[in-house]
């Protein structure tokens, strides 16, 4: 297994020309070496097949390296410009695009989603569930779903791969779309992870007249120069796409990439991207809506996205109906809240080597992760490509990166 451990000279390669920042965090040479040693060891032991890790400040990349393999069958070493299925890391991009429409007065955060997607005019909620007996009942929702609830995952919309109750409904009815399945909870009542951001993307499409891929390209990808981010991969870039591995019987089993890399665009997932491309979005948030000398979002809009929007409603543990696909998740259960598109970290007991309170984050199903720390003015992207989600070894890589970044961060 070939491991790429070349360090960037001084860690100062630009990812966003012209971005301005009041502070310039840095990662010292010992920190870069510690990260590389840890990551090389992780892939060398076979914990994960490969990874790309990027650490950025507001205006410069502090670390960007690749480790392991991107295609084991072909013996292809991982590359920094490798293309990953970033899945639900799509959600933050869609949320930012929708907030642009809010800025323009084209929709309101407390609008009823049925105003834009009539199928949600009379949602129903699961009122009784007996998994053992294989039965359930529903009742009409007492209140409508709002745009704010979609952005914070408090709408009650779930995923059938995650929620056993929805998996049962899908099995009994043969229907699995977000407008066909009942809500897991009353809107605003609890935090339930699901296809809410897919619906947000549908709202944006209805308002702008653009399909979600064209909407995101126009509002996010093109202004940020995210040239490797799209819902499909052209033939010329196919050799840069990382293969997917699954942990089966204690072994990592590789699935070759299909001939066609792409699918129906959705606001909640299915994007392909690179660490360098996603870095540009991270820098946009770190710079409160500015990138490359251009303002895409108002500073007050970004601050609103970073603010607790769920009050006392905290992140709760999400079960799984498909343990081969996902383990229970996420971190921060019972503590973290949600903003407009991001999970927000609560204070931790051992904060010294952890992301700071107020950090923004989420992930993708194939163990792709990011967090944005406004307090320390850094963002970190950790990309792997393996199932199940929240695999112990993948989480070990994530936590190992986090610890070493904060151990060596210089202000």
Image (cartoon, helix red, strand yellow):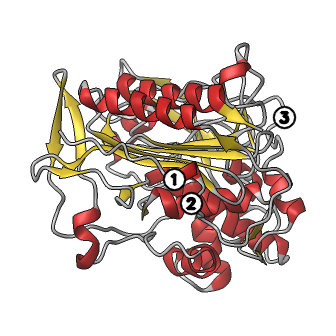
Residue plotted at (71% across, 29% down): 336
User: Where in the figure is residue 251, as x and y percent of width and height?
Assistant: 16, 26
Circle 2: is it few (<14), some (14-19), or many (20+) Cα within 10 Å?
some
Q: State yes or no: discs 1 and 3 in contact (Cβ < 8 Å).
A: no
Image quadrant assignment for residue 133: top left
Residue plotted at (47% across, 65% down): 266
Q: Is residue 44 left or right of residue 404?
A: left
Residues 182 and 214: in front is: 214
Residues 309 and 245: in front is: 245
User: Where in the figure is residue 244, as x and y percent of width and height?
Assistant: 25, 47
- Give residue 13's mark: 2
- Give the CA distance from mark 1 to mark 3: 44 Å
Q: Work out which residue is located at the far left of the displayed protein and give it.
A: 73
Q: Which residue is mark 1?
A: 9
- Give the CA distance from mark 1 to mark 2: 8 Å
Q: State yes or no: discs 1 and 2 in contact (Cβ < 8 Å).
A: yes
Q: Is residue 148 left or right of residue 254?
A: right
Q: State yes or no: discs 3 and 2 in contact (Cβ < 8 Å).
A: no
Residues 120 and 91: in front is: 91
Q: Which residue is mark 3?
A: 311
Vertical relation: 276 (above or below) 350: below
Residue plotted at (45% across, 46% down): 7
């Amino acid at each position: 297994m070939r491991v790429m451990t070349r360090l960037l000279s001084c860690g100062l390669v630009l990812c966003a020309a012209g971005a301005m920042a009041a502070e310039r965090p840095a990662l010292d040479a010992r920190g870069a070496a510690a990260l590389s040693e840890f990551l090389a060891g992780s892939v060398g032991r076979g914990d994960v097949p490969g990874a790309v890790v990027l650490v950025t400040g507001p205006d410069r990349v502090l670390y960007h390296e690749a480790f392991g393999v991107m295609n084991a069958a072909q013996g292809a070493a991982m590359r920094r410009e490798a293309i990953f299925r970033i899945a639900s890391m799509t959600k933050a991009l869609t949320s930012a695009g929708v907030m642009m429409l809010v800025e323009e007065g084209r929709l309101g955060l407390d609008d009823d989603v049925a105003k834009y997607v009539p199928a949600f005019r009379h949602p129903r909620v699961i009122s009784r569930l007996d998994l053992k007996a294989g039965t359930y009942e529903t009742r009409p929702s007492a209140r409508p779903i709002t745009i704010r609830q979609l952005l914070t995952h408090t709408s009650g919309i779930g995923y059938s791969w995650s929620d056993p109750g929805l998996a049962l409904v899908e099995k009994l009815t043969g229907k699995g779309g977000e407008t066909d399945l009942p809500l897991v909870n009353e809107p605003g009542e609890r935090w339930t992870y699901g296809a809410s951001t897919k619906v947000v993307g549908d709202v944006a499409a209805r308002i702008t007249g653009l399909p979600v891929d064209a909407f995101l390209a126009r509002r996010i990808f093109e202004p940020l120069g995210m040239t490797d981010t799209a819902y499909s991969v052209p033939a010329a870039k196919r050799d840069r796409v990382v293969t997917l591995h699954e942990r089966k019987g204690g072994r990592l089993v590789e699935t070759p990439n299909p001939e066609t890399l792409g699918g129906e665009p959705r606001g909640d997932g299915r994007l392909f991207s690179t660490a360098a491309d996603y870095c540009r979005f991270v820098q946009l948030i770190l710079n409160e809506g500015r990138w490359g000398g251009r303002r895409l979002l108002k500073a007050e809009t970004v601050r609103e996205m970073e603010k607790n929007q769920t009050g006392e409603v905290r992140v709760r543990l999400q079960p799984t109906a498909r343990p081969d696909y996902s383990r229970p998740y996420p971190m921060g259960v019972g503590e973290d809240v949600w903003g407009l598109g991001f999970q927000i970290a609560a204070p931790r007991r051992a904060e010294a080597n952890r992301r700071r309170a107020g950090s923004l984050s989420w992930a993708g199903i194939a163990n792709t992760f990011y967090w944005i720390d406004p307090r320390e003015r850094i963002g970190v992207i950790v990309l792997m490509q393996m199932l199940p989600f929240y695999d112990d070894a993948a989480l070990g890589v994530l936590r190992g990166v986090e610890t070493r970044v904060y151990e060596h961060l210089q202000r």
